[in-house]
Amino acid sequence: MSIDIAGDVLPDSTGGQPRAEGGIQVLPFYIVCDESSSMAGASIDAVNDGIIELFDEIHSNPTVDAKVRIGIIAFNDAARLLFPLTQLSDVTKIPECVASGSTSYASAFRLLRTQLETDVAQLRQRYQVHRPCVFFMSDGEPNPENWQSALDNLVDPSFPFSPNIVSFGVAGAQQAVIAQVARWNSKSGKKFFFMADEGGSPGAAIKEIIRFIIQTIVASARSNQAAFQIEDGKTIGGTGPDEGQVTTFVIDSL
């Protein structure tokens, strides 16, 4: 099955900030990762191994490296910018996540909005910029706080840099919550979220998620489309996606 979803093109509402015409197009991707104490052990190890794999894969492909910018936000009691939005060929040190604390979704969404305001505005001075895409990963229940309000503020249509969000749930994550986090700028209302198999290894599921993210980023850079090889809502297990199950979406410009 193949589904093409065209994203909405937002008007230029950046308050008079300069916008580059012509030239290279860049794709901003953010990985927002839960590093609460429930991620300790194999899960956080899989995240760190996956970050190295991500960097190696993109750095080894000059075409993809020229077009993609990667940022990483980690969160527990509070969110922190683990890695600023960067062209990976400029990287000299790969960061690590460290598991501790609770699970504040609200802090992650607030920091992400702040970073988008700064990062995308700067990119637009030199490049044509596609709408940012966020890969959100969590294994636990969010803290009892109004994280929904912070999420709504992040994806508010009036925010000129509102991102598309693909969400992944592993281990103890609640499907209803992971589904709520997923957002997409599409008139069809389609959105993308995935849950790991309940009986599977969290570490193995995270490794598969990271591989999935890498494949999506590389496909996006090559064709301005991303090939999702698992259907929306389908579980992520240890054996990989079913043959022929492909969803694609068109990445729109800001």
Image: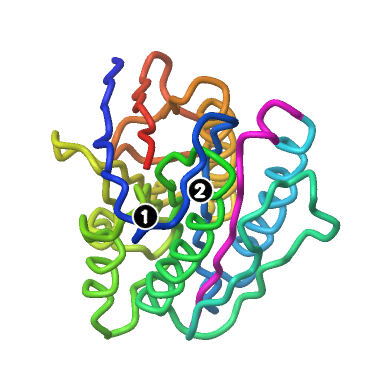
| Residue 25 placement: quadrant | top right
Q: Could you tell me which residue is drawn at 53 percent across and 36 percent down?
A: 212
Classify residue 202 as left or right of residue 60.
Answer: left
Q: CA distance from mark 2 to mark 1?
A: 11 Å
Percent of width and height locating residue 65: 70, 35
The tally of labels here is 2
- Secondary structure, mark 2, is loop
Does residue 253 belong to the magenta stretch?
A: no
Task: Using the image, tell me which numbered label, if any, was put on residue 7.
Answer: none
Quadrant into which the N terminus falls: top left
Of 169 and 7, nearer the camera is: 7
In the image: residue 211, left or right of residue 105: right
Instruction: Determine the residue positioned at 55% across, 38% down.
Output: 26
Structure colour scheme:
rainbow
Kind of residue at disc 2: Arg
Residue placed furthest toward the right: 92
Query: Which residue corresponds to the image point at 51% horizontal and 41% vertical from the top-left?
Result: 20
In the picture, measured across the screen, residue 233 lies left or right of residue 229, that is: left
Q: Position of residue 75 (x, y in %)?
A: 51, 74
Q: Which residues are magenta?
A: 61-76
Question: Taking 46 as reference, is 156 left or right?
Answer: left
Q: Which mark is residue 124?
A: 2
Pointer 1: what residue? 161
252 or 105: nearer the viewer: 252
Q: Amino acid at mark 1?
A: Phe
Residue that extends furthest to the left in the rendered view of this protein:
188
Please tell me whether residue 132 is drawn above or below residue 73 in the rendered image.
Answer: above
When the figure is inspected, residue 5 is found, relative to residue 36, above or below; the finding is: above
